[in-house]
Amino acid sequence: MLDEAESLQKVVREQFIKWAKNTPLILIGITNALVGDAVHGFQHSIPFATYKKAAIMQIIKERLRAACGDDIIFSEFALSIIGSKCESEGGVRIALDLAK
């Protein structure tokens, strides 16, 4: 399994794809950027919708509640900025990193 396949160097991605074509290896590539080189060579793709702003905000709130109880230290405005930024660029993983 290749998580964030788009971040691998092209030559590394191509080598994994070559191995998968020449052996009984099943290669699963996960990418946030389903474009061009990131998916070139994969035989099948299953697109999933990206997280929307409201869902990103909710995930951050749930993580904060788990860590801090009801004493959430983020304002709705701060959560909104993180949600907006990460809806268009990066997704939940980056949103959680920003919230740290």
Image (tube, rainbow, N blue to C red):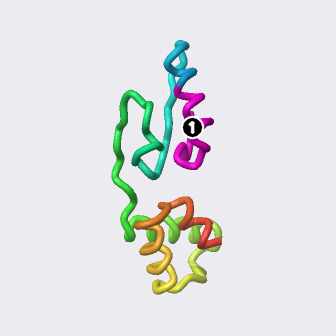
The residue at 54%/18% (across/down) is 25
Q: Position of residue 51 (x, y in %)?
A: 39, 60
Q: Which residues are magenta?
A: 1-17
**Other residues around mark 1 within 10 Å, as few (<14) / some (14–19) / many (≥20):** some
The residue at 49%/18% (across/down) is 21
Q: Position of residue 43 (x, y in %)?
A: 39, 27
* 38 left or right, relative to 1: left
Q: Position of residue 88 (x, y in %)?
A: 41, 67
State the count of labels: 1
* 52 left or right, relative to 85: left
Identity of the residue furthest to the front in this view: 11
Q: Is residue 100 depicted above or below 39 in this figure?
A: below
The residue at 49%/61% (across/down) is 90
The quadrant the C terminus occupies is bottom right
Of residue 31 and residue 72, the one placed in the foreground of this image is 31
Q: Secondary structure at mark 1?
A: strand
Residue at which label 1 appears: 2
The residue at 57%/70% (across/down) is 65
Q: Amino acid at mark 1?
A: Leu
